[in-house]
Image (cartoon, helix red, strand yellow):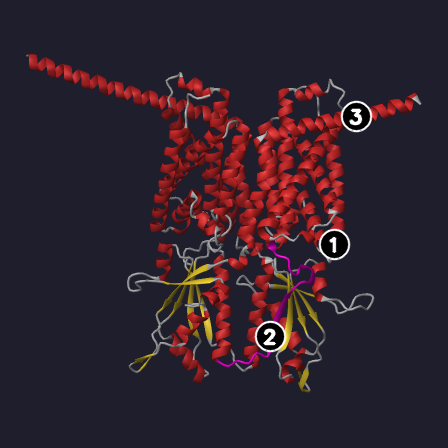
Amino acid sequence: MKKDTSIQITNEDSKQSKIAFLTKIQLFLRRVGAYIAAAFIDYRRSPLTVFFSVAYPIILILLFGAIFADSNNSFTAFTVYVQSEGDEGYVISPVQTLNFTDDLINALQTMKTNDSESLFDVHFIPLTNDQNGAINPGDYLEEVQGYISLVIPFNFTQEVLFNPDVTNLQIILDESSQSASIAYSIISSVIYQFNLGVSGYNETKIGLDTFDIYLEEEIAYFEFLIPGMICVALMNNGVMGTINRYSFFRKQGFFRKLSASPMNKADVVVGETSWQFVQGAISIIAILLVGWLVFKVPSGDFSWIIRILDWKIILVTISAVMSFVGLGMIGSRLSKNPDAATALGNFLTFPMMFLSGAFFDVSGVPGVNVISKLLPLTYLIDALRATMITGNVSIAWINIGISFAFGTALMIIGILITKLTEE
Amino acid sequence: MPEQETFTKKIYLSLRRIYGQTVSTAIRWVRSGPALFFTFIYPIIMILLFGYIFGATDDSLYTLNYLNEDVYQVGDNTYAFNPANQILQNLGLNNDTLAESLNLKLVQASIETSSITYNDWMKNNDIPYLLVIPSGWSAAVNESKVNATAPQALIEYYYDPSYTSSSIVQSIIDNVLQEMNIAEFSIPTVVDVVASTTPNREGLTYIDFIVPGMIMVTISTSSMMGMVSMVTEDRQSGKIDKYSASPLKKWEWALSHGLWHTCTSFAISILSVLTGWIVFGFQLSTIHPLMIGVLIFGSMTFTGLALVISRFVKKTEAAMAATMSFVFPQMFLSGAILPAEIMPDFMQTIAKIFPLYYVSEAMRNMMLESTFHLAWVPLGITIGMGVVFFTVGSIITDWRKE
């Protein structure tokens, strides 16, 4: 009988401790819920936060999408200025005259892209001006703000046919222009083909066969930008949001007040992280919807938005939130007031945005490519790109792993140095 | 006489008020973290970032993975020196100087071709580009030398299109192949291309063209964000309402802000130029005295715009969001960061809506003697915008309590 009573008491204790534990969890969840609700109200009332989480990435998507989208509408032909010093040609029969100047200009004018767009927009530089003075093609190019010009020498055809020396074509280009270097490379290929033709070869004997490794997947270039935009939005939300809120709380004395309430540091950190996850989800939905509506729906690819969804996006978002909330917590400890915190947030996020390769490929830039590998944003973008766009599972998991390592380390440092009781 | 004295005194008092307000703005600026960031740190970061990312093209080094599957055999003899090895040497294999001059670093790939395709290997290992010399390639090259109808000997280039550098690497390989064609098949060079830079740009680098644009981007961001936040905060705190009960006039108040923003514009310009000069060797000779005019009227334009925005969007946060919605597209579309020539035509048209486009154009055209005559129109537009926006901003600013 005694034994039964003792078993009953033990069961009662265990039941009570279970209830106490559940109550604790319930209260914890309520406190976290309250924090999230407060953060949401703050978000709704703050146009600046809405700007950074929704409008800013959408502006970037529209801008970079329109600039780099490989659709017919976006291609701009290379403008090349040609100055010919005159070519009489060479009469090979009463009905046939060779004119290499015309052939060369014609070749440039008829070259097409894969989408049958003209590759070059050819403009002509006159030889003399109104005062009958000679026009220097270099000066002319600068005056019209062009970036490349081709100067064909006098009697080019006869020079090629009868001059035993090499005939030089002059190319003048603006070396700071990216378009000039691409156009120069294409014109060089045309000249190379011309040499082959003169030598009696129909085609080059050694050639290059190119293979796009994502050809089957039919990935448009703008799709490669989407993960970058999403991660930039997650970074802005996380770093700027946390840094601003924490420094504002500290300045207003909220943290000290919270330390006198049942709310502890764990509640605040979990609340902030959960809220950033929700805010991240809002940003992701907004970016995907706009990208789909603007770049995919017009081409009839309605299923794109479903195809790119993958459950691993949740993992990438969690690791991003951990990394950037952690970074925000560290930043908020380093700055004493909200004004300075905003500046510090900008200082952390702005360079990261460009160094991580979100917009431009930095893999070939010495120094920058090393710094890029030290930034959490780089791995998050790679993880998301592999998850959503290329479907490369192994790359996705490696980068998710590295992102979680970054997230855990930054979060631990952030939690350790955050103090609710001070100031 | 007393009338003249009163007038002189009025001017003196007005100048004192402008001076007092300017000093007060300066003190607030110095005490504000974001303002200091945008004025002093932001231009340095911008110049360093874009200088390194876009300016270091000549120093770029692209890691090109290669796989040589070609073993050149005649009977039982294997020949170490063959076209396959030749092309790799021409690309800089075992020759660091040549490799660096081509901006390439060759790395031998280790691919189990029996179990994985090139595409999958590249995808799994995040490899941007791979050059494959297929089996029998050297034999095909040699066959072409004796048989005019022999098919083209092709090497294979696999690339990941998400890397923008893949087209650059392809172009490098193409050039090397062309040279090899000429050498192997004794193709005479009948026509050659001699390239030179435009006369006034000789000796100038990318950084020389990016610095003026960066200066104006920073000035526009700093002026607009700083001004909008200050005005809306002052309105919310009731400070502006108190001004209406003081002798300070609206135009004096606006002018003092304009003066202070012009001062910060000069500070930003000096910092940017110094950073560009010290780190990247920015050519100081490209600076023209008329650029001071662009700075002054550019600052007035952005200060005036900020006054217009803060007149219609009352709350600080909303006003900042509205300003950013304007500042960011302007930054990328104006041609200050991304060259306008790479944008589609319709975006180049949109760019012309933004004041920064004209301000940057004026600055850039003033750099070269040959383009200087093109600076007058954008300079005129900049002056016009400065006067109009500043006047309109000052007039419509409302000091009444809400």
Q: Is residue B196 magenta?
A: yes
Could you say which is closer to the camera, residue B344 or residue B66? B66
Q: Residues within 10 Å of mark 3 (few under 14, many from 20)?
A: some
The amino acid on which the numbered mark 2 sits, given as a three-letter code, is Asp
**Chain holding disc 3:** B
Lower position in the chain sequence, tag 2 or tag 3: 3
- The residue lying at 60 percent from left, 55 percent from top is B206
Name the residue at the bottom extreme: A93
Residue at mark 2 to residue at mark 3: CA–CA distance: 70 Å
Residues flagged by tags 1 and 3 on a common chain:
yes
- The residue that disc 1 covers is B372
- Location of the N terminus of chain A by quadrant is top left
Q: Amino acid at mark 1?
A: Phe
Question: Residue drawn 46% across and 29% down?
Answer: A333
State the CA–CA distance, disc 2 to disc 1. Answer: 33 Å
What range is drawn magenta here? B185-206
The answer to whether B93 is drawn above or below residue A381 in the figure is below
Q: In the image, is A15 to the left or to the right of A222? A: left
Q: Is residue A51 magenta?
A: no
Give the answer, above or below, for where B336 lies relative to B320: below
Which chain does the numbered disc 2 sit on?
Answer: B
Indicate the secondary structure of the residue bearing disc 3.
Answer: helix
Label 1, label 3: how many angstroms apart (C-alpha)? 39 Å
Give, as a three-letter code, the residue at label 3: Ser
Residue tagged 2? B192
As rendered, which of A274 and A77 lies closer to the eye? A274
Earlier sequence position, callout 1 versus callout 3: 3
Which class describes the residues within 10 Å of circle 2: few (<14), some (14-19), or many (20+)?
Answer: some
| Residue A239 percent across, percent down from the top left | 47, 35
In the rendering, which numbered label is found on residue B14? 3
Q: Secondary structure at mark 2?
A: strand
* Residue B68 in sight in this render: yes
